[in-house]
Image (tube, rainbow, N blue to C red):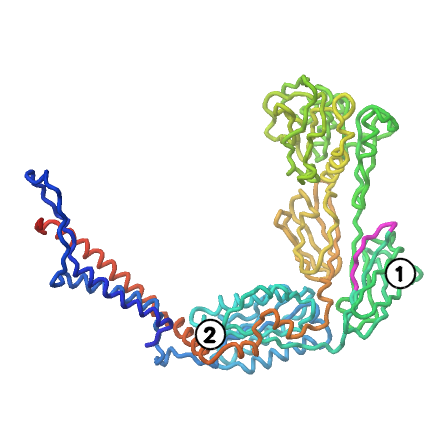
Amino acid sequence: MSFLAPLYLAGLAAIGLPILFHMIRRTPKGKVPFSTLMFLEASPPKVTSRSKIEHWLLLLLRATAIILLALAFSRPFMRQSEDQTVDTESKRRAILVDVSASMRRDGLWEQATQKVDALLKDVKPDDSVGLFVFDNELLPLLSFEEWSGLKAGHQATIAQERLNEVSPGWMGTNLGAVLPEAVTAVQDEAGEKTAARATEIVVITDLQRGSRIEGLQTYEWPDAVTVDVQLVEAMTTGNASVQVVGSIDEKSGLRVRIENVADSPHERFNVQTASNLDGDTISATELVAMQQEVHVPPEQNRVVQFKDVSNVSRSVVVSLSGDDDSFDNQAWYVRPQTSRVPVLYRGNGESSDPNELRYYLERAFLSTPARAIDFYADVDGDTPDEAWMTGLSIVAKSLSVEQLSMSSKAVEDGWTLIVVGSSVELCEQAFEITGTTVPDISEANVEGYAMLSDVDLEHPIFQPFNDVRLADFTKLPIWKHRIIDGELPKSSRVLALLDGRRPAIVELTHGNGRVLLFTFGWHDVDSQFVLSSKFVPLMNSVVDDFAGTSVEPPRALVGDQFSINTLAGSAKGEMIVTAPSGLEHSVEISPSGSALLSEPGVYAFAWADRDGPRTASIAANLDPLESRTDALGLDEIRALGVPLPDVVEARLTSDEKRQLLARELESRQRFWQWVILVGIVLLLIETWLAGHLAGGGAQSEPDTT
């Protein structure tokens, strides 16, 4: 028998402690009181050594427990047992094959499959093998458990068949995350019997410079792991790629970057755009006008601009020619679709009068690439009634009975209504529109001015102010406001308070819409809200929240999990996702709902909300790092601490190899578990016996004083 940690056997010296304790006479526990001795000072008995051991069985139990504890910590194992020896030549081998987009280059995948075939032919009978593919994540094709369950003659055949079923995709490479994940997967799947066996991870890859290896710098590799990087070499050298970096509008057009790697033999490329993805046709004259020749020296990039594509189509594809590798020679872009948001103002005043609220409202709403504002005022007399029911409405004067009914129906259908509560009647009408009980509302007696407090910065309309530098509303003086007494409806939400904990801004929900009630006026007599720095951002935030234009138009990379809530907002049901290849699948609209963008191109999304059927498109492009195809050197991998075979051989001495074998044997046998179990049983028996003897001795032991 041998021991993995023989120094713990020194603990056997502790066996003398039970013998010493048994030889020492202890103070008797049994006492008999005598009245004649109550005034005498107690004299403890002298402790003397015993001449003999009284409880041999108790002594043996305690000594045996100490022996077993020392043996358990020393980790015993058997070297001579034939059925427990380990063949030092056998290995646990994980084969990782790169299936990222850069492996689509000519000749790389064929080389990779040939290397896998050679590795499978070299497998020894005692080897344990697992086959994996990777790009930005690790996926198993044949696990170690499956390999062990197959017949010896069929293991390599099954592995080759499964590898033939896959091919390089369009994802980027992330070796910094994949290699540590592979070590964890190998150790988890190997099982206890091979937990300490030397593990070899064979990585078959082009090792291009965009492989994201930075994550390996802080990873601590296990002692028994070796990483063998087997490179595949492309038939061509160099690579150029194209990416869309700018947006399309009437002023700036479309900006495109062409990037050339360091070892590229080409410097001149042709770039052209086509925008007939939506079924539009382009004449030959237009197509020629959208072509440019670009000079990009190796290891540099250039940005070119196309101005003639803004009015052709929403979807644009940019193509690069003059490059030997075409896997990254196309890029897609979808111009944001501008939403038109009608805003109806129900109030008095001329648009040119700075003393009226309308003057400031018309200038507060700003058009962006994602939305355009159509401002209407009912006092102009030419606004159709339907217009204000299909947009955002701001009410600054009392409504008629008919207008109240129309407002209630509009809010119930999902629109937003802002009530500027410059009078008690207007505040009451806000509750009437939502069909809730009108609380007691009265004018407040304000001494000096009141200030806003407890603003709900988590609410979507206050998100622009959710910053410590912007969240101060105390500089907005309010001279007059209305007091709401009584309990508010359960469906309401107070967004801000005034002095005395009175509601200043209240959100009332009704059906699919809402009413935002301000209990103070915005101009002149009531406050200086329209002159404050908060007015314009707040008004535009309300519009963005209503129209769903608060999120920037999405731009995604292949491999992203695109959250469909970015498009659907509060809609319910399912969304149909159409990939660039034409494949369709449905995704449930929920906070966790997402669609995997697995290929480059334009994805189409279709769903239904309160306005009816809706559609949207986004462009998914190749990870720009995947285009950096100049190969990394093994020295750069070695510098990050990756245990390449030459590093491991130089690091392990003969003694360390013997120690590694000893750990393997001990991990397979695990004698220490049985030793611990026997020790626990002995300690339970010792505890019972010691208690039994102590109880009996307390009654029978005579008084020695």
* Residue 312, image x, y percentages: 87, 54
Label 2: state its secondary structure.
Answer: loop
361 on left or right of 81? right
For marks 1 and 2, the one nearer the N-term is 2
Tell me the number on the disc at residue 31: none
Identify the residue shown where x is 13% and y is 44%: 42
> In this rendering, is residue 457 above or below 81?
above
48 or 55: nearer the viewer: 48
453 or 521: nearer the viewer: 453
The residue beneath circle 2 is 197
Identify the residue shown where x is 82% and y is 23%: 348
- State which region is magenta: 242-251
Tell me the number on the disc at residue 290: 1
* Main secondary structure type of the part rendered in magenta: loop
Residue at the extreme left:
36
Q: Amino acid at mark 2?
A: Arg
Asked if residue 329 shows in the view, the reply is no
Picture quadrant of residue 650: bottom right
